[in-house]
Amino acid sequence: MNPHFLIIGAQKSGTTSLYNYLIQHPQISPAKTKEIHFFDLNYHQEIDWYKAQFPQQAGQNTITGESSPYYLFHPRVPQRVHQHFPQIKLIILLREPVARTWSHYHHEIRLKYETLSFEQAIASEPQRLQGETEKLLAEDNYYSFNHQHYSYLARGIYHQQIKNWQQYFPKEQILILKSEDFYANPAQTLNQTLEFLEIPPHTIESYPKYNSGSYPEIYPATKQYLINYFQPHNQKLAKDLGITFW
């Protein structure tokens, strides 16, 4: 089976939960793993390798898909996806960017990839990411650890990332959801997603949160700095897509 849908991000925005809810539907068969990362980290593999990550046989009217949240942010992925699957449906979860940034930082701490304080990490981000997007665009198989892991602020500039995808895919193939709406009413968001996938509504027994982290509150001064940082970007998002966070 070819994938019918991709959950492409954003990281730390509920993608694992939504995917696990979707694959409980009787007409959705899961991939071998939730995050295949073919179009970003494993593109050196052949397309047949990617297709082999999905069910080989399934019932009538059954679809499959995967969720790799780095897809949204990686600059090469939209063109790569379109090259192979121009009709695929794309699902995006957008979390309020201050909360996403804070969660992302603690995710990297848990992975032991980050040793700086949060304030040091966001201050170091421009230097850490300098030239990395250009290298990713210039070299087919270039991998950037910093771009994947230290992009705390950059990943929250949603309008630029969505614009990259809209260059290749029409709006009818892209579903954009707010994570806060999903957290507040997961059943409604699940059925909204199923409708987008042209699959009948479905109810599951429970809606546990997957990959939910526990960490201290952000310092008020740091939070205000981030609010100010993201404000102009959020205004562009509101203007272009009507999505607001504050």
Image (spheres, rainbow, N blue to C red):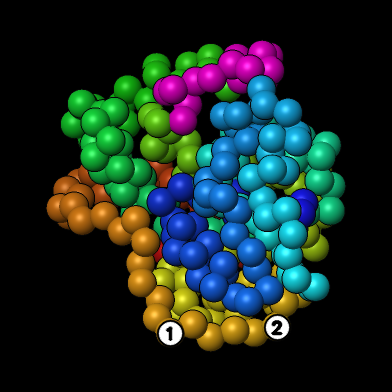
Give the residue displayed 46% in from the left and 57% down from the top: 16
- The answer to whether residue 106 is left or right of residue 230 is left
The residue under the point 32% across, 22% down is: 124
Tell me which segment is drawn in magenta.
Answer: 135-148
Amino acid of disc 1: Glu
Rendering coords of residue 200 (x, y %): 70, 83
Where residue 76 sits in the image (x, y, percent)? Answer: 68, 30
Image quarter where the C terminus lies is bottom left
Q: Any mark on residue 205, and which?
A: 1
Image position, residue 96 (x, y; %): 42, 57
Question: In terms of sequence position, does the residue under pointer 2 or pointer 1 come before the other?
Answer: 2
Q: Quadrant of residue 240?
A: bottom right
Marks 1 and 2: in contact by CB < 8 Å? no
Classify mark 1: helix, strand or loop. Answer: loop
Question: Mark 2 belongs to which amino acid?
Answer: Pro
Q: Nearer the viewer, residue 128 or 232?
A: 128
Rendered-image quadrant of the N terminus:
bottom right
In the depicted view, which residue is nearer to us: 127 or 15? 15
Tell me the quarter of the picture where residue 89 sits: bottom right
Is 168 in the magenta? no
Q: Is residue 214 left or right of residue 30?
A: left
Local packing at callout 2 (Cα closer than 10 Å; few below 14, some 14-19, many 20+) is few
Residue pointed to by mark 2: 200
| Alpha carbon separation for disc pair 2 and 1 | 17 Å
Relative image position of residue 35 (x, y in whole percent):
53, 46
